[in-house]
Amino acid sequence: MTFLGRGGAFLIGPRDERWDVAMLIRHRSVAAFMAFASDEGYLAGIGHRTAALEDSRLLPLVEAQMMEAFV
């Protein structure tokens, strides 16, 4: 895990939407994440994760150099 933080009201975003926690995870590649997400051990416990969450988002990001991000 790269980052775990408490959420709250958005500075910019829907007023009626609030997030309790945000987590940033780094994987070597999309393929590495897909291997993790399809692992039998992970899938065996996915029911607990799903039951514990009201909502979630998965936003894949690719690291870019500062100038590349704006091109």
Image (cartoon, rainbow, N blue to C red):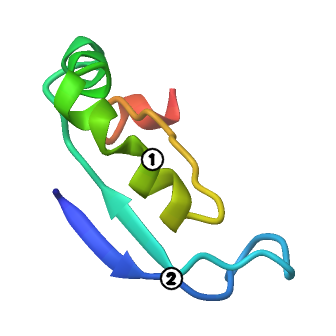
Name the residue at 51% across, 26% down. Answer: 71
Tell me where residue 8 sits by quadrant: bottom right
Point out residue 31 in the picture as x, y percentages from the top left corner. 25, 11
Q: Nearer the viewer, residue 59 or 56?
A: 56
Residue assigned mark 2: 7
Q: Can you say whether 64 is above or below 35 in the image?
A: below
- How far apart are the alpha carbons under marks 1 and 2? 24 Å
Residue at position x 41%, y 56% from top?
A: 48
* Amino acid under disc 2: Gly
Q: In the depicted view, which residue is nearer to us: 54 or 30?
A: 54
Q: Secondary structure at mark 1?
A: helix
Location of residue 29 in the rendering, given as x and y in whole percent from the top left corner: 21, 19
Mark 1 or mark 2, which has the lower sequence index? 2
- Residue 63 visible? The answer is no
Q: Is residue 3 above or below residue 47?
A: below
- Residue under label 1, please give it: 47
